Amino acid sequence: MRLIKKISRMRDYSKKIKGTRVIGFVPTMGSLHEGHLSLIRKARQQCEEVMISIFVNPTQFGKGEDYQRYPRDLSKDMKLSEKEGVDVIFAPSREEMYPQGYSTFVEIKGNLSSTLEGASRPGHFKGVATILTKLFNIINPDYSYFGEKDYQQALVVKKLVKELNLDTRILVLPTIRGKDGLALSSRNSYLNKKERTAATIFYKVLKRAKEWVGEGEKDPSALVSKMRALIEKEPLVRIDYVAVVNPKTLEKVKEVRGEVLALLAVNIGETRLIDNIKLADS
Ligand code: PAF
């Protein structure tokens, strides 16, 4: 396994491989967990060369967010990656990706990036779109893998790739959960024991929402109210949003008909967590 820190080396290596071996790419911010490993395993099955990036991207964090304390452990990530058969880790420094005077950004306008996470975290998707455009340009992967936990991010990335004609195919894989149902996230490491227990409410509520729909609930506002009421029973949790939307456009639906998506974002202590589930009427 190679560890590459310089853009020029990474670009040279990818250029050599491109066209001779199918390149699968998993962009990450490190602190790898089973969610990332499931993406790496899929890339390993489908591609001949597996590359991952590890970069805590400052431009996607807002003021007062957790950029400084975001968990970083490159040596542990390297061991895990090696075990999964990763060929290359690209782990550039902040200065390498954003040298002094850096001022070029990619912005996706419209509802898809301005609603939900976009509304709660202004500028977040601009940072995500910018870093991914850079990484796709440097690595030039045939396939790029994302997790469904960050549902909105996956939609935004697909739009980015389509509209900028970037030459990679986006694959989105299911959320990996702990035994208690909590979606795996690097941010779960911030939770203390009590918070971790409280956090299991999110998946319970999402699953309950699915049952309500199965039982015939068609009214999205009623669904949202019932979900909020259940979450509010947990005193450690503060709701940011609970939404029932069209899974393609993320626009609010007037009725639960066909497939709809329920998403939530909550704060528990100092930790912000998101999750989602697809709901389908019967
Ligand atoms: O999902 C993440 O970890 C990040 O948003 C990503 C895609 C690696 C971009 O920094």
Image: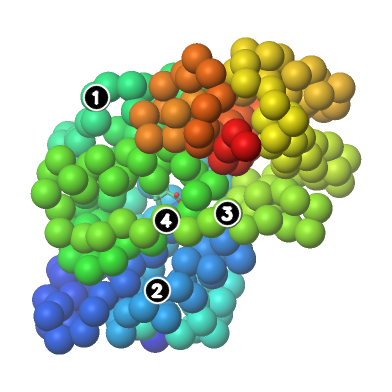
The amino acid sitting under disc 2 is: Ala
Q: Which residue is mark 3?
A: 175
Quarter of the image for residue 112 reads top left
Q: Which residue is mark 2?
A: 43
- Please state the horizontal and vertical placement of residue 105, each as a whole percent of the image: 20, 35
User: Marks 1/2: CA distance?
Assistant: 30 Å
Q: Which residue is mark 1?
A: 109
Q: Are marks 4 and 3 in contact (CB under 8 Å)?
A: no
Q: Reading the chain from its start, which is encountered first: label 3 or label 2?
A: 2
Q: Which residue is mark 4?
A: 172
User: Marks 1/4: CA distance?
Assistant: 22 Å
User: Marks 4/3: CA distance?
Assistant: 9 Å
User: Marks 2/4: CA distance?
Assistant: 11 Å
Q: Are marks 1 and 4 in contact (CB under 8 Å)?
A: no
Q: Nearer the viewer, mark 1 or mark 4?
A: 4
Q: Nearer the viewer, mark 1 or mark 3?
A: 3
